[in-house]
Amino acid sequence: MMNKQYVLITGGAGFIGSHMAEWYVNNNYQVVIIDNLFRGKLENIQHLIDQGNAVFEKLDLTEYDDIKQIAELIVKYKPFQILHYAAINGTQYFYDTPEKVVEVNSLGTLYLMKAIVAAKKTVSNYKPLVLFASTSENYCEPFNVPTKEEDLTYFRLEQDRDSYAVAKMVSEFYVKLYCQKIDLDWIVLRIFNVYGPKMVGTKYGQVIPEFFNRIENGEYPLKIFGNGRHTRSFIHINDHVEMTTRLVFSDKLVTNTVYNLGNDYEISIKELGERIMKKFNKVPKFEFLEEREGDHLRRSPDISKLLSIIGEYEFISLEDGLDTLIKK
Ligand SMILES: NC(=O)c1ccc[n+]([C@@H]2O[C@H](COP(=O)([O-])OP(=O)(O)OC[C@H]3O[C@@H](n4cnc5c(N)ncnc54)[C@H](O)[C@@H]3O)[C@@H](O)[C@H]2O)c1
């Protein structure tokens, strides 16, 4: 058997992580996946395991006892890239269990970094690239839209929603400081809303699959938090994977820095709802609910830094991207 290179993906049974795993396998790499299956599903990666291209370990990044096992996995497989996607994601969790969100999303990164430090001590000349999946939520209500990487990130102590952002900000720091300490290259991706197949569509999921789910289950009019004028910028998962991998494999990659990663096409939640309802041949009609506390009005990335590395990029349109979610 050919001696393939390994990549480690935390949260690899989840939405983005499993699509990343698929890309690496399709491009002749082997993947080591760590996930505690909190929201991820084995079925997302079972085919990769069955083909012998993925190793799966059910481990919890917040369990101190699991650090040793993670370090051993790193020593065994020596992944040339470590992609850290494991976290609690899903806006409703930020409101319902904010203390758990802060704990898992910060401690998980700290423990992963400790495992990397421990592994590096035993493997000579080991220099993996560490990629951390951060978030556009760190810009809170952005000072500028489109938002650049150097725009301010901040959190509001009075808003439970920011449990997610504060943990991601602390994690960015952990990744930077620990990598600096042991001389590893790192990049932080501030990811703007991703959508696509395999995404969770329950109330603990994300807006696009949730709208699909509710409409399919007969909800009419469609319920929207707030007045629907909030905006977001959605990137299809295929574009997300393509841009990320172009970036990390680029000869021009600049490491030890932050990149916004998203599609800069901005759309209001109401218009998004209209477009999805039309896909189901429904006349758009809405019921507006009380706004979620601390929600952000606008979000759209300035991606010029990313494009300066990967070159011009043609995105999948929202219209075409939404079609990939329609059950045949
Ligand atoms: N989906 C988006 O639009 C988006 C936007 C910005 C940032 N991100 C970030 O990208 C990453 C992936 O997001 P996603 O949408 O695929 O979410 P997801 O929930 O599908 O994936 C996260 C995975 O992490 C796993 N996990 C959670 N806690 C864990 C723990 N303690 N130990 C081990 N595994 C654990 C979950 O089971 C899940 O499989 C997350 O870090 C998220 O914060 C996602």
Image: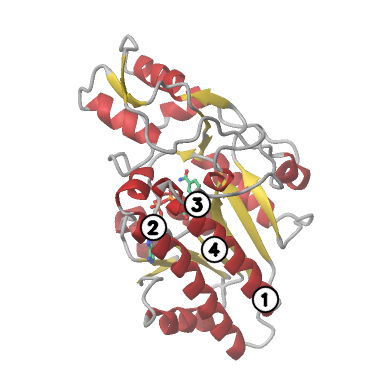
Binning the other alpha carbons within 10 Å of mark 2 as few (below 14), some (14 to 19) or many (20 upward) gives: many
Q: Which mark is residue 171?
A: 4
Is residue 11 visible in this depiction of the protein?
no
Q: Which mark is residue 127?
A: 1
The quarter of the image holding the C terminus is: top left
Q: Tell me the element at label 4.
A: helix
Residue denoted by label 2: 101
State the residue at coordinates (24%, 18%).
220
- Asked if the residues shown at circle 3 and circle 2 are in contact, with their CB atoms under 8 angstroms apart, the answer is no
Q: Quadrant of ligand 1?
A: bottom left
Q: Amino acid at mark 4?
A: Ser
Q: Is mark 1 within 8 Å of ligand 1?
A: no
Which sits in the foreground, 273 or 51?
Answer: 273
- Asked if the residues shown at circle 4 and circle 3 are in contact, with their CB atoms under 8 angstroms apart, the answer is no
Distance from Cα at disc 2 to Cα at disc 4: 12 Å
Residue denoted by label 3: 165
Q: Amino acid at mark 1?
A: Lys
Where residue 151 appears, as percent x and y from the top left, is 69, 44
Is residue 226 visible in this depiction of the protein?
yes
- Asked if the residues shown at circle 1 and circle 3 are in contact, with their CB atoms under 8 angstroms apart, the answer is no
Distance from Cα at disc 4 to Cα at disc 3: 10 Å
Horizontal side of 50 relative to 30 (left or right) equals left
Asked which quadrant contains residue 264, the reply is top right
The furthest residue to the front? 158
- Dot 1 or dot 2, earlier in sequence: 2
- Dot 1 or dot 3, earlier in sequence: 1
Binning the other alpha carbons within 10 Å of mark 1 as few (below 14), some (14 to 19) or many (20 upward) gives: some
Q: Tell me the element at label 1.
A: loop
Q: Nearer the viewer, mark 4 or mark 1?
A: 4
Asked which quadrant contains residue 206, the reply is top left
